[in-house]
Amino acid sequence: MLPVDQREEIVVLIAGGSTVGAVMTRAVITTSPEATVEEVAELLSRHHITGMPVIDDHQRVVGVVSEMDVVTKPGRVAGDIMTPDPSMVGEEMPLHEVADLLMGRRIRRLPVVRHGKLVGLISRTDLVLFFARHQWACGGCGATQRGLRPPPTCPACGRPGPDFSLEDAPHGM
């Protein structure tokens, strides 16, 4: 488990599109199945988070536990109240696909795994930050549009979608 001051948000742009690995939170607060419910509640509260992965001794995700689990489910330890076998994604998944998954299933966060081991966490907040900080620019006319994927055509000149590049959005726009 990492202290909140060691959490980092790394935003890396990948040419031609954006993936989970480019915007996920890498320093993830986690707990073990053996942690008491009181310890889980303390971690959630101290780090101002609403949920976290539950990992085993080999860094494999065995569940997720949320504030809702702490408040509504009876149990003594995280393993008793967690949601077991959660959905997980890989770093290479496109952002628009993970957005569809998060929104479609009404999930707040998904563990990101590589070779079965936790490497990050992608949340709806990460998607909102990406949306706020980036825009797609048309290679033809320079018009910009925000989104998790390039538009199929430029709304200004009608140019097809593959001719878009991802760029930093002006601050405050």
Image (spheres, rainbow, N blue to C red):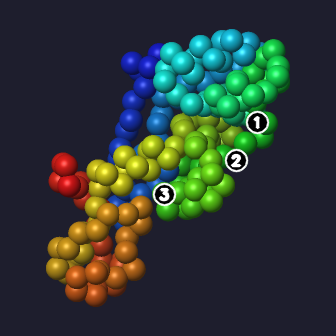
- Identify the residue at image location x=17%, y=79%: 141
- Asked if the residues shown at circle 1 and circle 2 are in contact, with their CB atoms under 8 angstroms apart, the answer is no
As helix, strand or loop, the secondary structure at mark 2 comes to loop
Q: Nearer the viewer, residue 142 or 39?
A: 39
Disc 2 packing (10 Å; few <14; some 14–19; many ≥20): some
Classify 3 as above or below 150: above
**Disc 3 to disc 1, C-alpha distance:** 24 Å
Q: Nearer the viewer, mark 3 or mark 1?
A: 1
Q: Which mark is residue 83?
A: 1
As helix, strand or loop, the secondary structure at mark 1 comes to strand
Q: Amino acid at mark 1?
A: Thr
Q: Amino acid at mark 2?
A: Ser
Q: Which mark is residue 11?
A: none
Classify 111 as above or below 97: above
The image position of residue 171, as x and y in percent, is 18, 48
- Identify the residue at image location x=75%, y=28%: 72
The residue beneath circle 3 is 95
Q: Quadrant of residue 6?
A: top left
The image position of residue 8, as x and y in percent, is 39, 30
Is residue 99 in view?
yes
Upstream in sequence: badge 3 or badge 2: 2
The residue beneath circle 2 is 87
As helix, strand or loop, the secondary structure at mark 3 comes to helix
Q: Nearer the viewer, residue 139 or 81?
A: 81
- Identify the residue at image location x=79%, y=36%: 84
**Disc 3 to disc 2, C-alpha distance:** 16 Å
